[in-house]
Image (spheres, rainbow, N blue to C red):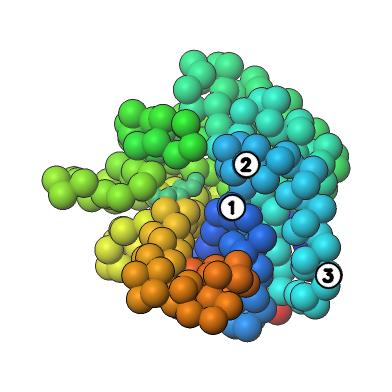
Amino acid sequence: MLVSATEMLKKAKAGHYAVGQFNINNLEWTKSVLLTAQELNSPVILGVSEGAGKYMTGFKTVAAMVKAMDEELGITVPVALHLDHGTYEGCYKCIKAGFTSIMFDGSHYPIDENVAKTTELVHVAHALGLSIEAEVGSIGGEEDGVIGAGECADPDECKMVADLGVDMLAAGIGNIHGKYPENWAGLSFDTLDAIQQKTGVMPLVLHGGTGIPEDMIKKAIDLGVSKINVNTECQLSFQEATRKYIEDGKDLQGKGFDPRKLLAPGAEAIRATVKEKMELFGSIGKAND
Ligand code: 13P
């Protein structure tokens, strides 16, 4: 069932768990995430970066595929189709294409411009029943060409943006897209705590979910994080399983070259990663809460 992320995140915040956003790249990714959410009776958010949208030939293709797949697989758990780190133009394209949720990443603009553009998009998104995420501070590292310095968010600016009526707020707290470096200082819980004090019931979003130790994830959820984004970890699981299939020579046996066989171990590996994350985030069994 395609829905906005508003209700599922309100429930997650009140219930002290987090909903996973799993970024999708193609049909296999989408199918793996949807089937796992349904099997575990968990709400889920499908994230689509602008780069992944382009790879899949455009947001219209993505929305049509996700809607049809959701229906044909008989998915009954709440699913939000969400633009990840959207530009201003990208947000409008996704609204038009039929996404149910958008993220406007105005974190690289001066705060006044971030506020002005976010305000406009909040009105447009809400008028059409979509949820909207905004960002303050920046997520370190690089994701599909979006590069962030990784500075921690200012809690007062977070309050200002939360008050614009967004449904979820991404705040930089030392998190990084991709693999964490050996010398990573960890999440800044002081910053997260200060943000949560200022923003109250606002569901907070933790980007860069790949490789964050379990205890830090749990502490972040305790401090108000209700949505956690995972991208790289599913890519690594897929890559490892696919590499093994080929290194074991399975593609050379019988009809092992058939893409439905070749891509099956990777798709299964994504399902295992999504399951592991849903267990950790506490969203299993929460679809009908
Ligand atoms: P990772 O690739 O580090 O899991 O981050 C995902 C993310 O934050 C998507 O916005």
Tell which circle, 3 or 1, labels the residue nearer the N-terminal end. 1
Is 39 placed left or right of 236 in the picture? right
Quarter of the image for the C terminus: give it.
bottom right
Asked if marks 2 and 1 touch (Cβ < 8 Å), the reply is yes
| Residue 40 horizontal/vertical position (percent) | 59, 82
| Residue 21 horizontal/vertical position (percent) | 55, 58
Asked if marks 3 and 1 touch (Cβ < 8 Å), the reply is no
Tell which circle, 2 or 1, labels the residue nearer the N-terminal end. 1
Q: Amino acid at mark 1?
A: Asn
Distance (Cα) linking label 2 and label 3: 23 Å
Nearer the camera: disc 3 or disc 1:
1
Distance (Cα) linking label 3 and label 1: 19 Å
Query: Is label 3 in a helix, a strand or a loop?
Result: helix
| Residue 65 horizontal/vertical position (percent) | 77, 56
Label ID, residue 25: 1
| Residue 163 horizontal/vertical position (percent) | 61, 36
* Residue highlighted by disc 2: 55
